[in-house]
Image (spheres, helix red, strand yellow):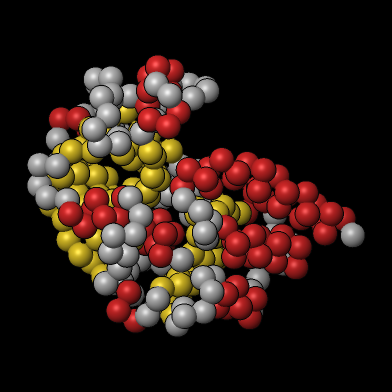
Amino acid sequence: MAGKPRKHHRGVVQRTERISRTMVRVVLGGDGLAEFATSGLTDHYVKLVFPYEGVEYPEPLNVQTCHETMPRELWPRLRTYTVRAWDPEVRELTLDFVVHGDEGLAGPWAERAVPGDEVVMMGPGGGYAPAPDADWHLMVGDLSALPAIAASLEALPAGAPAHVFVEVDGPEDEQETKTAGDARISWIHRGGRPVGERLVRAVRDLEFPGGRVHAFVHGEAGFVKELRRHLRVDRGVGLDQLSISGYWRRGVDDEAWRAVKRDWNRRVEEEEAAAIAS
């Protein structure tokens, strides 16, 4: 692991709650979060550390130490999750997990978690919060981006205009959201269509309000790529007005996506620059 070592924290499960058919909320606490802190961003994220069972790791568990002293095939697996909420007064960190039965790694962990379970995490990172001087806001994402969108809605200034599109499998996956902003929230039901297909159509069909937009677009990399091109090329939205990235990629796990994400983003930027120049 290159660069500055990332701070590690150890959270203890306090309680869990199923908040929709496909999402479980886990609240972490404990003395291991004594140095955890956020800075006002609404897309803060942590990287949860999942060791392999039966493997002896250095104590305390530290990803950088593992990378320096262990073969790659034994390195702990990392999964990235948005900080849904952080309460420094009671020292509680809330994370929301998409769950699909036994599919994946973090989802099954969250579904089985009970008070007293522990998890090591790195972070938080992040880079977005709704700009208070924007004329209006655009927020677009699938289930993986819903925690950040919900946190962003809560942070909107009173009366701030926003168009919000969230894709979920069906009505049973919708969640109650709170905001002081003037937000028009559209729940897009995927209905068996490819992930993001109906999201892209909804944004393309949106009559953009006048003024300067601040946009947050995250989720599966394929539809994010389509929307980035649409916003940058067709709508002329500047990069300084965008927080946009593929949280995940259909057909690959988190490790495989991280391995190619930088090259993917580079190709997207090159194609975009060529389209804008033409």
- Would residue 191 be seen by someone viewing this image from the given angle? yes
Residue situated in front as seen by the camera: 161 or 238:
238
Q: Quadrant of residue 125?
A: top left
Q: Is residue 205 left or right of residue 22?
A: right
Residue at 82 percent of width and 59 percent of height: 275
Residue situated in front as seen by the camera: 179 or 63:
63
Residue at 19 percent of width and 44 percent of height: 28
Q: Quadrant of residue 235?
A: bottom right
Q: Position of residue 187 (x, y in %)?
A: 42, 77
From this view, report whether residue 258 is shown above or below residue 146: above
From this view, report whether residue 134 is shown above or below residue 8: below
Q: Is residue 115 left or right of residue 262?
A: left
- Would residue 151 be seen by someone viewing this image from the given angle? no
Q: Position of residue 263 (x, y in %)?
A: 67, 43
Q: Is residue 127 left or right of residue 61?
A: right
Residue at 24 percent of width and 44 percent of height: 93
Q: Position of residue 188 (x, y in %)?
A: 46, 78
Residue situated in front as seen by the camera: 119 or 96:
119
Residue situated in front as seen by the camera: 221 or 159:
221
Quadrant for the C terminus, please: bottom right
Q: Quadrant of residue 172?
A: bottom left
- Residue lying furthest right: 278
From this view, report whether residue 215 is shown above or below residue 27: below
Q: Position of residue 245 (x, y in %)?
A: 56, 52
